[in-house]
């Protein structure tokens, strides 16, 4: 029996928003006063990508855009740029997710890595064209690589602790997905 109830979908959407809020809260805490020579992974980005591949109905476009616009304001980034890039990347992965065909995790990870790299490079390119001051290129590459390496952990966390698994054929039929 398919476990696709509207209440479960709304609960998981609220869970995504709550996780994003918790990650933002801990990133904004002033735990270190010295600047670091490395950048941590973007955990909300990897969660958004993992959920977009596995359960696109849990992360609708409006939730993704709203979450990342709020993060743009809180992290003093150009408002809407990262939100737009993440939204494009997640929607690209959603269109590639075929519920009836099982892809290997390596293929999923590779697709997510390509999207993460595209987001980082497009963000840097737009900021360069608009002459906005940026972090050093090496720091952006470190953050990108850390984010790519954090994807398996986010997928494992999402699947085992939160129950965000790929759609089964019955669930895909219940949602009206195409074959």
Image (cartoon, helix red, strand yellow):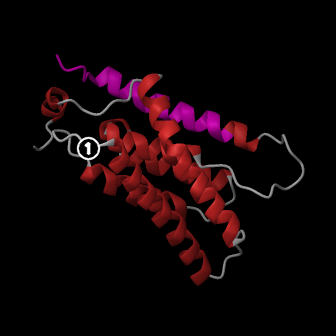
Q: Identify the residue under disc 1.
A: 103
Viewport quadrant of the C terminus: top left
50 left or right of 39?
Answer: left
The crowding category of the residue bearing disc 1, from other C-alpha atoms within 10 Å (few below 14, some 14 to 19, many at least 20), is few
**Where's residue 146, x and y in %?**
60, 52
Q: Is residue 47 visible?
A: yes
Q: Is residue 39 above or below residue 159?
A: below
The residue under the point 68% across, 49% down is: 40
The residue under the point 41% across, 24% down is: 11
31 left or right of 61?
Answer: right
Give 3 or 143, whichever is nearer the viewer.
143
Mark 1 lies on a secondary structure that is loop
Q: Is residue 4 above or below residue 141?
A: above
**Where's residue 2, x and y in %?**
19, 20
Q: Which stretch did the figure color magenta? A: 1-24
**Where's residue 82, x and y in %?**
53, 60
Find the residue positioned furthest to the top. 1
Viewport quadrant of the N terminus: top left
> Main structural element of the magenta stretch: helix, strand or loop?
helix
Find the residue positioned furthest to the left. 179
Q: Is residue 63 visible?
A: no
The residue under the point 42% across, 56% down is: 87
20 left or right of 58?
Answer: right
Query: Would residue 4 be counted in the magenta stretch?
Result: yes
The residue under the point 56% across, 51% down is: 147
Q: How many marks?
A: 1
Query: Would residue 22 be counted in the magenta stretch?
Result: yes
**Where's residue 10, x and y in %?**
37, 27
């Amino acid at each position: 029996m398919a476990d696709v109830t509207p209440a479960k979908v709304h609960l998981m959407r609220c869970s995504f928003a709550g996780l994003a809020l918790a990650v933002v809260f801990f990133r904004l805490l002033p735990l270190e006063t010295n600047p670091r020579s490395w950048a941590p992974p973007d955990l909300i980005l990897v969660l958004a990508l993992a959920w977009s591949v596995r359960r696109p109905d849990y992360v609708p476009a409006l939730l993704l855009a709203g979450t990342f616009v709020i993060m743009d304001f809180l992290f003093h980034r150009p408002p809407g740029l990262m939100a737009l890039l993440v939204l494009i990347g997640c929607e690209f992965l959603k269109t590639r997710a075929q519920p009836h065909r099982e892809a290997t995790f390596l293929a999923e990870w590779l697709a997510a890595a390509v999207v993460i790299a595209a987001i980082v490079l497009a963000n840097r390119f737009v900021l360069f064209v608009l002459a906005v001051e940026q972090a050093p290129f090496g720091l952006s590459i470190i953050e990108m690589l850390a984010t790519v390496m954090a994807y398996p952990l986010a997928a494992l966390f999402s699947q085992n602790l939160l129950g965000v698994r790929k759609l089964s054929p019955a669930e895909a039929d219940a949602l009206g997905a195409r074959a």
